[in-house]
Amino acid sequence: RKPLTLKEQQELIISSFPGVGSETSKLLLTNFKSIKNIINATEKELKEVDNIGPKKASKIFKLIQELYEDQDMHMDLHP
C-alpha cells in the first residue's frame, strides 16, 4: 500500500476525534483549514460546523483541553 498523502493523514487524525468520521473530518478541515486551527477552536466555533452539535463539540473540546493522565504512572507515584 502506498503511503498516505498529507491530506489523508490530516483527515485520519481528525477522524479519530470522538464522534467524528470521514465526512465530518473533511468539514472541520475545510472550515478551519488546519489541524492547529481545529485544536485552537472554541467549543462555540466547533458547534458552528455542519454535523457538529453541542454534544459532539463538547466531547471534542474536552479531548483537546484535558490534561493527559497516565493511570499507570499515577499508580506508581502513589502506592
Image (cartoon, rainbow, N blue to C red):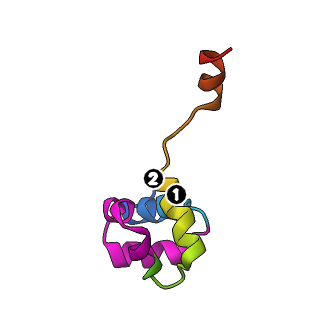
On screen, residue 59 above or below 33: above
Look at the image and give the residue range highlighted in magenta: 19-46
Please name the residue that numbered disc 1 is placed on.
62
Which is the main secondary structure of the residues drawn in magenta?
helix
Residue 69 or residue 36, whichever sits in front: 69
Q: Is 18 contained in the magenta span?
A: no
Residue farthest to the front? 78
Q: Residue at x 54, y 67 (%)?
A: 58
Q: Amino acid at mark 2?
A: Gln
Residue 23, position as x, y percentages in the image: 53, 78
Spatial separation of the CA atoms under disc 2 and disc 1:
5 Å
Q: Residue at x 59, y 17 (%)?
A: 77
Q: Amino acid at mark 1?
A: Lys
Q: Is residue 50 visible?
A: yes
Residue 8 occupies quadrant? bottom left
The number of numbered discs placed on residues in the rendered structure image is 2
* Residue count near mark 1 (Cα–Cα under 10 Å), binned few <14, some 14–19, many ≥20: few
Please name the residue that numbered disc 2 is placed on.
65
Residue 2, position as x, y percentages in the image: 48, 56
Residue farthest to the top? 79
Locate the N terminus by quadrant: bottom right
Under circle 2, the secondary element is helix
Residue 72 occupies quadrant? top right
Q: Residue at x 47, y 78 (%)?
A: 47
Tell me the tag on residue 71.
none
Residue farthest to the bottom? 50
* Label 2 close to label 1 by CB (< 8 Å): yes
Residue 71 or residue 10, whichever sits in front: 71
Residue 40 occupies quadrant? bottom left
Residue 25 or residue 2, whichever sits in front: 25
